[in-house]
Amino acid sequence: MPLRLIERAPWERGNPVVSALVGLVLGIILSVMIGFSTPAGPLGVVNALIRVYTSPSHIMSTILYSGPIAASAIGLSLAYRAKFITIGSEGQVILGSVIAIGLLLYSGLPEIPPATAILLAVFTAGVVGALWGLIPGVLRAYLGVNEILSSLMLNYVALYIVNYLVSGPWSKGPFTMTHEVGPSYTIGPIHVLIILIALAVFYEWVLRYTTLGVGVNAYGSAPKAARTYGFNPKRLLVEISLISGLTAGIGGALMLLGFQHSLKSMSQPPGYGYMGILVAWLAFRSPLGSLLGGLFFASLLTVGYQLQIVGVPLNTVLAMQAVIVLSVLVTTTMSQYKVVWR
């Protein structure tokens, strides 16, 4: 008999947060079982997991890593609600980091107080991320260009901009990297968390209580009905591309000022913006859910580093991370459906 998935009615669906926690526990159990085949053994895996989720220093590291991931996901949550499937957050994060370090080290601006300089760097990175995100939005709205392809290509343009800068005008002597920003221009986990919470709350408010939020939900659910009620689809796509790029650009500044501190040559994008794409879908395109999802994915990065320290091979670490992510994804998705034999 064929197996079918039938979407549950809204009142039949479980709490997605509870489902995600169940998936997290299941994924951790499976990861511990994988640990039997590693030199560290299951106890080493368990100890690494406990340290990540209980040690203050590891929790602080997790918050720092969540900056670019959660910021990207918060903006993408609105874009994906409107069926604007951009994957350009990776390039926007990269350019945000470029603008931040460019202003602080290479702009030639006169000396200004560090706090003012940091705010200026974060704000300018957000503006540049928004303008970079505007490109696929305009191409989609006025020329019908697929935003998936255009935004993907722009990610590599941003990568090559970095490679040019670190091997040319911004190179640190013979090295293909920039100088590091000074300690006075770095930010801590508390500042990152405050910025992320402010972004998530603001975007949640936009989604629930503004005309733009109504347009996002209407256009994503029924484009023809949205036009009937007076929403201009071209203008809506342009606005969405701007606000999704804004947070990703801010995420790039948080990445640079929080834990990266310099730019290096890259053969592949670092991947924080791509993680934000998965987080936005996993959080059911909710800004507040994207904040929590970003912290969760950042904790997986911290777990990976700790597992490598105790002797778990990199390939096994990646397999464990994938098992945890898939477990959460499966449980949250299945909370929206029921399995029926017909």
Image (cartoon, rainbow, N blue to C red):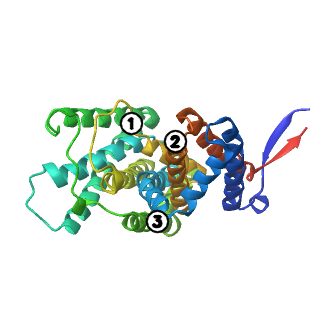
* Residue ID for mark 2: 308
Instruction: Say if 333 sits above or below 111 in the image.
Output: above
Amino acid type at mark 1? Pro
In screen coordinates, is 153 left or right of 230? left
In three-dimensional space, the C-alpha distance between marks 3 and 1, rounded to whole angstroms, equals 30 Å
* Residue ID for mark 1: 269
* Residue 56 visible in this rendered orientation of the protein: yes
* Mark found first going from the N terminus, 3 or 1: 3
SS assignment at label 3:
helix
Question: What is the x, y in percent for residue 216?
Answer: 51, 56
Mark 3 vs mark 1: in front: 1
In screen coordinates, is 180 left or right of 87? left
Question: What is the x, y in percent for residue 173?
Answer: 14, 36
* Residue ID for mark 3: 206
In three-dimensional space, the C-alpha distance between marks 1 and 2, rounded to whole angstroms, equals 22 Å
How dense is the environment of label 2, judged by Cα within 10 Å: few (below 14), some, or many (20 and up)? some
**In front: 221, or 227?**
221
